[in-house]
Amino acid sequence: MINVARVAKTYESPAGPLTVLRDLDLRVAAGESVAIVGPSGSGKTTLLNLLGALDQPTSGTIAIDGVAIGGLDPSAAARFRNRSIGFIFQLHHLIPQCSVLENVLVPRLAGGWEESATATRERATSLLEQVGLQDRMTHRPYQLSGGEQLRVAIARALINQPKIILADEPTGSLDPATGERVAELLLRTHALATVALVVVTHNPGLAQQMQKTYRLEAGRLVS
């Protein structure tokens, strides 16, 4: 599902070129769960951005389900993200003016979907029931706890039935008990949806529950 080959990422800085990733390789099978750990500033989020077609590598190739995403133009990259990838961000990025149900439906606004509005709404409702928020659908984000907001983000990531879920520090802003419950939910959701899951985390408990764990060191992944 994910095939990364000899990828490098270099940024220009006042002090000169800064290479964050170098000759990085990664393969993730369909339905597989992978954790990426490492110190802050090691390039974990940069790698997620590349996998999600939010950025492009300086060199090397990235293929997602057979699609080479490194050379996609902005429009094609946006369509690819919408159709193939579900994002779970540490800060959730929920829209405060929208209800929980409306936030889950936001990825469908890109258009071009053949599914009826009724069927989409029913699936969004089902996803919220799966994450235990059936009684919160009309609430606004500010009326939810941090763990509940993250559960909304998980449902939103699944609404387009993606092939891959990318999660950036999904438990980073939660207390240990809530983080453990959310980790269990994420793994259960991954199993039910049978998607590839890549999680960047500082949480060793979450990392240990993934099928594979890599550490990002000196711009490369170490098993």
Image: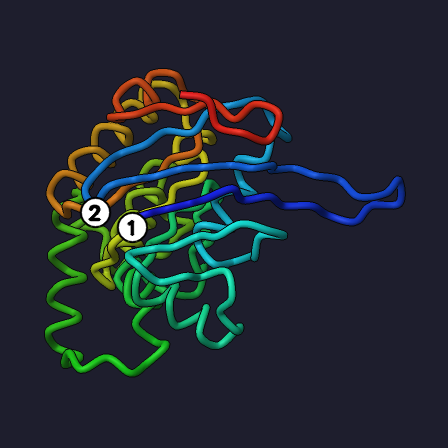
Give whichever of discs 1 and 2 has the lower sequence position: 1
**Residue 140 position within the rendered picture, expressed as x and y whole percent measured from the top left:** 36, 56
Q: Which residue is mark 1?
A: 164
**Residue 201 position within the rendered picture, expressed as x and y whole percent measured from the top left:** 44, 28
| Residue that extends furthest to the right in the rendered view of this protein | 14
**Residue 164 position within the rendered picture, expressed as x and y whole percent measured from the top left:** 29, 50
Three-letter amino acid code at disc 2? Val
Q: Are marks 1 and 2 in contact (CB under 8 Å)?
A: yes
Three-letter amino acid code at disc 1? Ile
- The residue lying at 65 percent from left, 37 percent from top is 20
Q: How is the image coloured?
A: rainbow
- Which image quarter: residue 211? top left
Q: Which mark is residue 195?
A: 2
Q: Describe the element under mark 2 as helix, strand or loop.
A: loop
How far apart are labels 1 and 2 at the CA level? 5 Å
Q: For the residue carrying disc 1, how many other residues have a C-alpha within 10 Å: few (<14), some (14-19), or many (20+)?
A: many
204 versus 123 height, above or below: above
Comparing 139 with 80, the one in front is 80
96 versus 192 height, above or below: below
Q: Which mark is residue 42?
A: none
- The residue lying at 47 percent from left, 31 percent from top is 173
9 versus 171 height, above or below: below
Comparing 173 with 214, the one in front is 214
